[in-house]
Image (tube, rainbow, N blue to C red):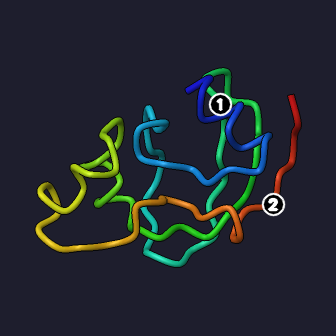
Amino acid sequence: DKGAAKALSNGKSLLAAGISYVVGNFKKGENVLIVDNNENDLARGLSSFSSDEINKIKGLQSNQIENILGYASKSEIVHKDDIVILWKN
């Protein structure tokens, strides 16, 4: 969403709350393309979750992830240290 795009351009991590949709299937640790709602490429990063997990938690607050997935995990979908920004607003 727009908030996530702004956060990424300011050097922040990508959180589940900022994700609207997931395209494709990928595993935890894979390189993913992060796009905005207009399909503009924003960044590339290493996902801390699989596509199946992200589909379960997208749009949720970080404190809800453990209850949905059933285990404790990172709160960032893609940590800021694992992101390369492709476009800056």
Quick check: 57 left or right of 35?
left
Query: In the picture, which quadrant includes the C terminus?
Result: top right
- Residue type highlighted by circle 1: Asp
| Residue pointed to by mark 2 | 84
Q: Residue at x 66, y 53 (%)?
A: 33
Relative to the observer, which residue lies in front, 27 or 4? 4
Q: With respect to residue 43, does 84 lie above or below?
A: below
Q: Residues within 10 Å of mark 1 (few under 14, many from 20)?
A: some
Query: Could you say where residue 12 lies in the image, as x and y percent from the top left?
Result: 68, 50
Query: Could you say where residue 64 lies in the image, as x and y percent from the top left?
Result: 21, 49
Mark 1–mark 2 distance (CA, rounded to whole Å): 15 Å
Q: Residue at x 62, y 61 (%)?
A: 32
- Residue type highlighted by circle 2: Val
Q: With respect to residue 71, does 78 lie above or below?
A: above
Quadrant position of residue 88: top right
Quadrant position of residue 39: top right
Q: With respect to residue 79, does 7 lie above or below?
A: above
| Residue pointed to by mark 1 | 36
Q: With respect to residue 50, does 11 lie above or below?
A: above
Relative to the observer, which residue lies in front, 5 or 54? 5
Quick check: 39 left or right of 10?
left
- Please tell me whether mark 2 sits on a helix, a strand or a loop: strand
